[in-house]
Image (spheres, rainbow, N blue to C red):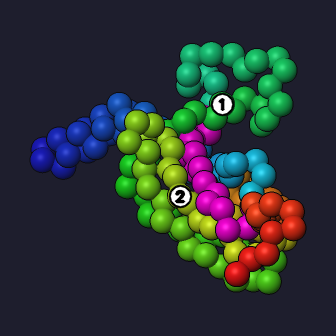
Amino acid sequence: MRRLLVSIVVASMLLVTPRPVSAAMQVTLTIAPASVVVGKPAEVLLRTFVPTGWEELGMEAPGSWPFVPDTAYVLWPVPDYPFSVVAQADDGAEIPLVMTLDPVDPTLWRGVFVPDTPGMWRVRATNFPESDPGANVTFAVVPAPASTSLAPAGAVSQ
């Protein structure tokens, strides 16, 4: 009798627990500002979501949906995942980022780093496969503009 009761409780929990078609969390990374400059802070935004079936949402897939057919991507709060994110320079040097959950949006994590060299950089969530397109973003870091002197023409500096 006790076994039967436990089986019923476990089965009912499985039936009432919402489960997406693919229970795997996914992420997408973006960089701001659009033009990253050496020596200036760059913000990394990490957004969490899960793929699920349109039918589980009670909806039909839009006719012009450009992604995986029959799959909707739903923003999903992940307040306690230990994201491991690094910024990687062309030469392989890495800067680890501290990602902090946004206080207003539970699907958004933020981190900041300051690139120290120009060239192509990549930010990567290392606890996701390298082949995962959302867990990688590549961007150019441009040199800082040359500083201009404020001294009037012909002035002698001492």
Percent coordinates x, y for residue 11 in the rendering: 32, 39
Label 2 environment density (alpha carbons within 10 Å; few <14, some 14–19, many ≥20): some
The type of residue carrying mark 1 is: Ala
Q: Is residue 113 left or right of residue 15?
A: right
Residue at 43%, 40% in the rendered image: 106
In reply to whether residue 48 is colored magenta, the answer given is: yes
Q: Helix, strand, or loop for circle 1? A: strand
* Left or right, residue 100 beside residue 150: left
| Residue at 70 percent of width and 75 percent of height | 116
Q: Main secondary structure of the magenta part?
A: strand
Horizontal side of residue 71 vs 155, given as left or right: left
Q: Amino acid at mark 2?
A: Gly
State the residue position of label 2.
111
Region of the chain picked out in magenta, as a range: 37-52
Which residue has dot 1 on it? Answer: 72
Q: Is residue 77 visible?
A: no
